Amino acid sequence: MKIAVCPGSFDPVTLGHLDIFKRASNLFDKVIVAVATNAAKQPMFSPEERITLIHKTIEDSHLDNVVVDICDGLIAEYVEKVGAVAIVKGLRAVTDFEYEFQMALVNNRLYYGAETVFLTTAAENMYLSSSIVKQVASFGGDISSFVPACILKDIEKRMRITDTKG
């Protein structure tokens, strides 16, 4: 069985992420979406909440060979632990490539058993990121064309809670 890990913070999961999940699920027998901690980011959703949102998204999209897990440490160690053969990363632009290429080299050095596979984003998602979704939502903008419909209300509800705290 060919297993791939698709790591990211997914805060929140977007249609761009979903596109990568779908395409990876066509290439591998099993795809593990690994919700990772990024110390450089201030998350809007807890890891458990992000897992719930991703679960809703993959169930709604009928991605039967995609599962969700949490990764608290190094991606390379996680990949080795689950027996994956690939790390799948989505690329939007050249700037993504520079960072992701560095990470691929580091991951390969830490665990030689997994290759990094880059999937270029669909043209309609080139501008899309979780940060953009949060920024637009924080100003009350319409994010319905950025996130899966099945989690839109969850994100909007969180934004209202965040707004009342600020």
Image: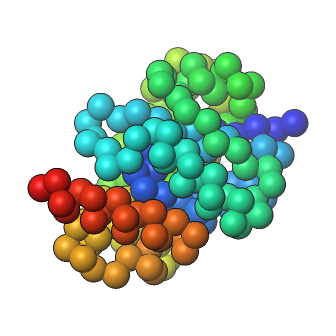
Is residue 80 found left or right of 97 in the rendered image? Answer: right
Query: In the depicted view, which residue is nearer to us: 14 or 20?
Result: 14
Q: Quadrant of the N terminus?
A: top right
Q: Residue at x 72, y 33 (%)?
A: 85
Q: Residue at x 79, y 50 (%)?
A: 65
- Residue 139 placement (x, y as % from top left): 19, 73
Count of residue discs? 0
Q: Is residue 156 above or below residue 87?
A: below
- Residue 116 placement (x, y as % from top left): 59, 39
Colouring scheme applied when the structure was drawn: rainbow
Q: Is residue 26 above or below residue 148?
A: above
Q: Residue at x 38, y 76 (%)?
A: 143
Is residue 34 found left or right of 31 in the rendered image? Answer: left
- On the question of residue 95 being in view, the answer is yes
User: In the rendered image, which quarter is residue 31 located in?
Assistant: top right
- On the question of residue 134 being in view, the answer is no
Q: Quadrant of the C terminus?
A: bottom left
- Residue 160 placement (x, y as % from top left): 27, 65
